[in-house]
Amino acid sequence: MPHRNPQLNAQQTKLSTAFKTAFVKSLPVMAGYITLGIGFGLVYTASGLSTLGALLFSLIVYAGSMQYVSVNLILSAASPLHVIFMTLAVNLRHLFYSISMLSKYKGAGRLKPYLEFALTDETFSIVCDGVPSPTLNAPHYYFYLSLLNQIYWVTGTILGITLQNLIKIDFTGVDFSMTALFVVTFTDQILKRKSLPSSALGILAPLTCLLLFGSESFLIPSLALIILILVPTTLIQQRHDSEQQPPLSNHLLTQTAPKNQTTQTQPNTQEAPHDKN
């Protein structure tokens, strides 16, 4: 029998466990991403654009709602500057995602570029829950989770392209599925994380700008208002949390001190032998 390296077997077991856990965690996303990917494949190809372009969008761009928006931008021959500003406006929320992921993706090494690229709303929501088990390999768990979610999206895109080429489908209203997914994700974050201040800001800022600037011009001002308020408060909160966290040495001392104290102060229950005489 060939000799097996115990360290290699242990590493393979950790990777296998990380993949299985990531797959289970990604199952709720699978249903949504395959459906949304089908919608994008239908919308893109039904607009007269190439099937290869739709597939490349899901492989290289992988921007969720921005992929739906890009269809109208391409058809209207929008200027590159318009495309840049629209992309920033739609995906500016990733600025806040990246701040939250600084500690999560620390130590990811060569996996970090892909983790940053594949960070979507649903992936962010799952990653925020942390690693399910302390013995799990966190970087590989996050990597498999991100990879599986993109595979679901690409698979849905391929199915949408295939359906559109086989049968003609009326895709009216399909693009609203992305809005519905945002509502579900937003509600789930409120229920799980109880982040009422930031959630209230995300609702009140767009409504205020909608009343002030109108439905055609409210998006960029509302995002700018959210940035001006949320970024400084988030950084201040993270700095405050880091200052409140005790050093590791003090933490260890507090854990070992009671044991030592108990050992030192434990009364001697043995009685001295009495002299019978």
Image (cartoon, rainbow, N blue to C red):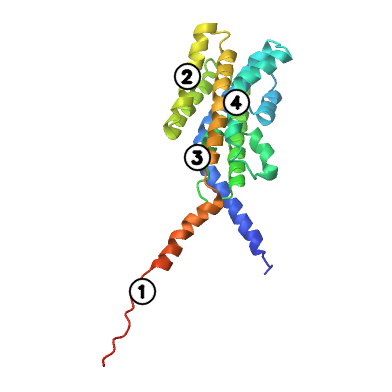
Q: Disc 3 residue type? A: Asp
Between disc 2 and disc 1, whose residue precedes?
Answer: 2
Which residue corresponds to mark 4? 64
Q: Nearer the viewer, mark 2 or mark 1?
A: 1
Viewer-proximal residue among 204 and 266: 266
The 10 Å Cα crowd at callout 2, few under 14, some 14 to 19, many 20 or more, is few
The location of residue 259, given as percent across then percent down, is: 44, 62
For the residues marked 1 and 3, what is the alpha-carbon distance in whole angstroms?
49 Å
The location of residue 256, given as percent across then percent down, is: 48, 60
Label ID, residue 203? 2
Vertical position of residue 15 compared to residue 202: above or below:
below
Which residue corresponds to mark 3? 129
Q: Answer with left or right where residue 167 lies relative to residue 272.
A: right
Q: Disc 4 residue type? A: Gly
Viewer-proximal residue among 196 and 45: 196
Which residue corresponds to mark 1? 268
For the residues marked 2 and 1, what is the alpha-carbon distance in whole angstroms?
66 Å
Residue at x 49% of width, y 36% of height: 28
